Image (cartoon, rainbow, N blue to C red):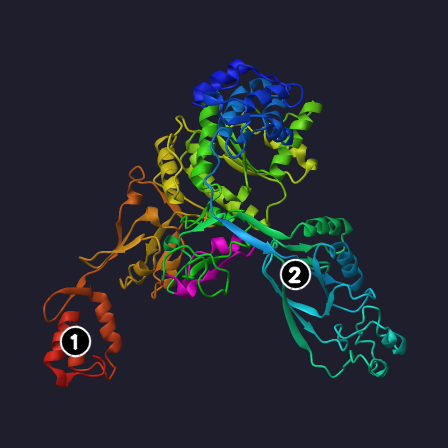
């Protein structure tokens, strides 16, 4: 790699990052100059700073050297950070111009680790259910039985069971499978006349059956059986065959499940941890067996998602509004619990249908999240318009700090038109490594351009419109997301919809097009397309980069980004139309001829965007708070409300943050005290609808024109005139 130590040191100093260690450039540190690493690992005092190694290929070697070097601090005391500058920058046709990028990568790598979050625990004792035909299940059981407690479930006759009863065998049709690693619940319906618990596998029934309807799976093919009952006679001693036995449903719990059938028990893109579906693929079977043998013990993973029920726009008063998170979840870890919405406040971590206290909190309605099923993709947080669901590991604050550091360091080192290339640490990182290696050996391959800054994340779906627009405001020219084939179809659609909204905002402000795109690279065969996609021409960016830090709240970050983009906009626009799918902003339109100002919409709005006026009959609206969930429209008894996805930027964006009146009406004055209450139209409508009702005649009808206080006074002073309508 054409590295310039002096230029890198200057660039890091300009970016505010530590340039320590760049006095000497170790170009073969992983092998020939390993001693330099050991000397740094033994440094004490002021020199004992965290180590940053710009090589990921030999990570294992460096960690081993640190353990074996006498006097070196353990990782718990002094972490070692690793960053790849070879495939991402040095192995490219732009390598000589990549100093700003390398400085940015080194600066970001020096950031502290993300704040820890609570863990989700799994406990597996190794009780494994193998589902499939007799032959396949027996073969798998033989590979697993020395490590696991194996149980077989045979769904149909066919194949052969071993003569020895080395593991439990059940027969029947699987009717239900739910749960996760260490907590699977299986139910199956058994209708075969042979009870495998009682069967001694003496083979007498097979020999006696004239139709050959019984095979060595010790199940009867009922379509072939002609009911001679010879099998019952020869099995008299064991009593394992009973054609009069009623079909029964059995259930049991398991820690692990190996599914050898053609169709999987779980149809979602990401099945639960602890479940392996391999079908008839022998290579997949051997991989699953290796993993199953190690799936005994206690395991943990981060609790990736936090949930703030107070601002969730999913439901109010048992009415459904936003379902974006439920629709996008590929693991079915999210479910609706709308019936209890609003009764308690707090974070909810409970599975669908689970009652009682979960994590010290009772289920409160709205969205129920089962963290054991969550795979940490973060797509729910990306599509959530209110920020009620947020990605926790890393948080948006940590992720925002990382991308801001990259951009600031790149700009401080003299870089221009930076692109953030968001990719997954696993498959996405592998595609970038493959592209870098190809550029090293093939002159037809360009490699990762100098202006493209790779940004690894746990999952590409975890970063959304708030961080994308913040990046553009902070100086990124474009934001691209690399899809490496591991993403569910729901994620691709959601990311595409969110990018369409973000691009509409920038286009409406005069920045033009081509700021966002999804890049597909499923395997090494897509490298040529990836290489070409990364060389797209720059788009129009901001003239001055913003300095704000990403906020914990999604809407707060969006407001900061939009305010800066508006201030720098090449063209001002009071109103930007947004695509309906995925739009987190918009207006509420009210049909004044239908609205009676009952204010049911105010009570159901989860974000406080709709307001009343205690002094006069008015419906007011703060547009910046609206998340377009539709709860107001679904609640309105007059069907007077419609939604309009848009970004309203009148008065330099200040108008959208102020209350404005959507509808107002003349108040109705109490006929007794003159105090205004309700609206003239609402009271007249009520009186008209009740005019023919027997309970609202005479004095009772007159009380409808009174305020609440006067109605009570009139009831107490004229008790003989009280009708059932008054009560």
Position of residue 714 relative to residue 169, above or below, is below
Secondary structure category for the residue under label 2: loop
Is 419 colored magenta in this rendering?
A: no
The residue at 86%/82% (across/down) is: 230
Query: Quadrant of the rendered structure where residue 213 is?
Result: bottom right
Residue annotated with mark 2: 265
Q: Residues within 10 Å of mark 2 (few under 14, many from 20)?
A: some
Instruction: Using the image, tell me which numbered label, if any, was put on residue 703.
Output: 1
The residue nearer to you, when weighing 363 against 443, is 363
Q: CA distance from mark 1 to mark 2?
A: 64 Å
Asked whether residue 589 is in view, the answer is: yes
Residue displayed at 65% across by 52% down: 295
- The mark closer to the camera, 1 or 2, is 2
Residue 696 at x, y percent in the picture: 21, 80
320 is within the stretch colored magenta: yes
Quadrant where the N terminus sits is: top right
């Amino acid at each position: 790699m054409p590295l310039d130590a002096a230029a890198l040191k200057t660039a890091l100093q300009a970016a505010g990052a530590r340039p320590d260690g760049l006095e000497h450039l170790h170009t073969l540190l992983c092998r020939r100059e390993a001693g330099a690493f050991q000397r740094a690992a033994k440094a004490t005092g002021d020199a004992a700073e965290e180590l940053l190694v710009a090589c990921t290929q030999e990570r294992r070697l460096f960690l081993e050297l640190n353990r074996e070097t006498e006097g070196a601090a353990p990782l718990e005391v002094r972490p070692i950070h690793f960053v790849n500058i070879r495939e991402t920058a040095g192995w490219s046709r732009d390598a000589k111009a990549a100093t700003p990028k390398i400085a940015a990568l080194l600066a970001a790598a020096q950031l502290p680790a993300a704040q820890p979050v609570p863990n989700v625990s799994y406990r597996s004792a190794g009780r494994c259910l193998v589902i499939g035909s007799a032959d396949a299940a027996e073969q798998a059981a033989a590979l697993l039985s020395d490590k696991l407690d194996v149980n077989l479930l045979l769904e149909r006759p066919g194949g052969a069971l071993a003569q020895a009863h080395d593991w439990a065998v059940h027969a029947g049709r699987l009717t239900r499978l739910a749960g996760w690693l260490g907590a699977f619940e299986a139910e199956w319906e058994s209708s075969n006349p042979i009870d495998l618990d009682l069967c001694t596998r003496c083979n007498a029934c097979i020999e006696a059956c004239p139709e050959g309807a019984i095979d060595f799976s010790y199940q009867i093919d009922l379509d072939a059986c002609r009911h001679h009952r010879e099998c019952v006679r020869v099995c008299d001693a064991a009593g394992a065959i009973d054609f009069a036995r009623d079909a029964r449903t059995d259930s049991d719990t398991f820690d692990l499940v190996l599914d050898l059938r053609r169709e999987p028990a779980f149809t979602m893109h990401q099945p639960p941890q602890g479940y392996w579906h391999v079908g008839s693929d022998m290579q997949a079977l051997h991989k699953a067996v290796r993993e199953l043998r190690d799936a005994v013990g206690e395991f943990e993973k981060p609790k990736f998602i936090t949930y703030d029920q107070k601002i969730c726009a999913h439901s109010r008063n048992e009415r459904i509004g936003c379902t974006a998170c439920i629709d996008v979840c590929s693991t079915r870890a999210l479910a609706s619990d709308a019936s209890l919405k609003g009764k308690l406040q707090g974070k909810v971590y409970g599975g669908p249908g689970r009652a009682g206290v979960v994590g010290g909190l009772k289920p409160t309605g709205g969205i129920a999240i089962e963290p054991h099923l969550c795979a940490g993709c973060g797509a729910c947080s990306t599509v959530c318009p209110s920020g009620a669901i947020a990605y926790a590991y890393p948080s948006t604050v940590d992720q925002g700090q990382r991308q801001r550091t990259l951009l600031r360091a790149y700009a401080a080192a003299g870089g221009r038109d930076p692109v953030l290339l968001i990719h997954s640490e696993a498959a996405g990182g592998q595609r970038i490594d493959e592209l870098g290696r190809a550029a090293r050996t093939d002159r037809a391959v360009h490699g990762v351009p100098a202006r493209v800054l790779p940004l690894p994340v746990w999952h590409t779906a975890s970063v959304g419109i708030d961080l994308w627009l913040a990046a553009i405001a902070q100086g990124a020219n474009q934001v691209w997301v690399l899809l490496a084939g591991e993403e569910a179809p729901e994620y691709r659609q959601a990311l595409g919809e969110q990018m369409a909204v973000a691009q509409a905002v920038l286009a409406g402000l005069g920045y033009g097009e081509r700021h966002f795109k999804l890049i597909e690279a499923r395997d090494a065969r897509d490298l040529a397309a990836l290489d070409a996609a990364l060389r797209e021409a720059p788009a129009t960016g901001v003239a001055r980069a913003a300095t704000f830090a990403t906020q914990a709240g999604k809407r707060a970050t969006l407001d900061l980004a939009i305010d800066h983009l508006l201030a720098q906009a090449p063209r001002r626009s009071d109103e930007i139309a947004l695509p309906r799918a995925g739009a987190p902003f918009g207006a509420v339109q009210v049909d004044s001829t239908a609205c009676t100002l009952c204010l049911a919409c105010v009570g159901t709005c989860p974000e406080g965007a709709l307001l009343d006026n205690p002094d006069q009959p008015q419906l007011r609206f703060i547009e910046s708070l609206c998340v377009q969930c539709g709860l107001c429209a679904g609640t309105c008894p007059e069907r007077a409300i419609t939604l309009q996805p848009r970004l309203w930027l009148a008065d330099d964006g200040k108008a959208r943050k102020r209350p404005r009146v959507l509808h107002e009406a003349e108040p109705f004055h109490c006929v007794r005290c003159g105090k205004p209450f309700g609206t003239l139209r609402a009271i007249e409508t009520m009186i008209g609808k009740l005019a023919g009702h027997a309970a609202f005649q005479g004095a009772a009808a007159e009380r409808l024109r009174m305020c609440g206080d006067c109605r009570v006074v009139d009831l107490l002073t004229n008790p003989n005139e009280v009708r059932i309508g008054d009560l």
